[in-house]
Amino acid sequence: MIPTAVFIGILFSAICSLAVPIGVWIYLIKKDKTKKINRYILLGLFGFFAAEIIVREPILMILGGEAWFADFANSNGVLYNLFLSFTVAIAETAARFLILKFAVKDEIGFTAGLGTGFGHGACETMAYTGIVSVVNLMVCIMIYTNSLGNTEAYADIKNTLTSQSPSVYFAAGAERVLAIIIHIGLSVILAYFIKKGMAAAGFAVCMGAHCVYDFCVKLTAQSGASVWVTIAAMTVFAAAFAAAAVFIRKKENAETPKIVK
């Protein structure tokens, strides 16, 4: 049987990476008075899909088949991580920028940043962790109900699921929630700069912040420290980006003309 702690960890990961994004999506739609948030979310979702699934990941796969690139990755760990962080930052920032600048246009503001950022993060979370977590959860249920039988496949699947500490599954769920917060913060920051007519500066700030965040988290994860150290590092970045988003929201509200009745 699958240890109870592992099962609960997988369930927690599935909730954080699939149920939470879907629940927040529904909540945002119900609370939105402008009736535009769903469009922003879908734009953000498409932006991530285009930047990563269509553009960046296929390019990395092609490069991965080159001997010189494999040698570079194996012999220059820090530079390779910096390269990965830079490429993810520029690809995803470009997607944010194009959507906010040309698809949102005159509607740009905090709500647009919130929606596109959430859509971006939700797509990443559901695509990279949500599906895997749900599959793992289904397999666990099949093992508990003895649907797989006592076969070699059963042993292999069980060993795969239990080879990881339960904390890894809990950390995976927490990491996905933090990632969504970070993506929202980055999009809100970029939207604010574009709205103020400082698109180039906003692109540079957003891309630089994304690169630094991704690079620091990668180094922390590969340092050999506990997975919770990585989560702690992500929490610091998530708190900083969330604080920036809250500040921008308050500033936007203060700048909005009040209607005198």
Image (cartoon, grey):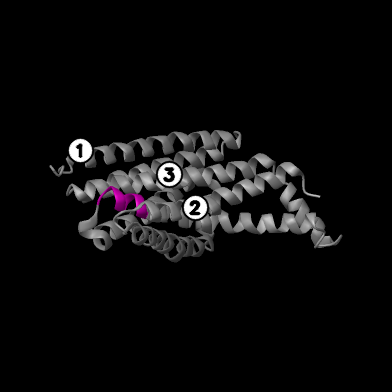
Residue 125 appears left or right of 186: right
Q: Amino acid at mark 2?
A: Gly
Label 2 neighbourhood size at 10 Å, few (<14), some (14-19), many (20+)?
few
- Residue lying at 39% horizontally and 54% vertically, measured from the top left: 30
Q: Could you tell which of marks 2 and 3 lies nearer the N-terminus?
A: 2
Helix, strand or loop for disc 1? helix
- Residue lying at 20% horizontally and 38% vertically, measured from the top left: 254
* Residue 221, x across and y down, in percent: 55, 40
Q: Amino acid at mark 3?
A: Ile
Q: Name the one closer to the observer, 177 or 95.
A: 177
Residue located beneath label 1 in the image: 254
Label 1 neighbourhood size at 10 Å, few (<14), some (14-19), many (20+)?
few
Helix, strand or loop for disc 3? helix
Task: Specify whether residue 204 is in view.
Answer: yes
Q: Name the one closer to the observer, 2 or 85.
A: 2
Residue 19 appears left or right of 188: right
* Residue 258, x across and y down, in percent: 16, 42
Residue located beneath label 2 in the image: 23
Which quadrant would residue 247 be assigned to in this image?
Answer: top left
Q: Could you tell which of marks 3 and 1 lies nearer the N-terminus?
A: 3
Q: Name the one closer to the observer, 59 or 36.
A: 36
Residue located beneath label 3 in the image: 181
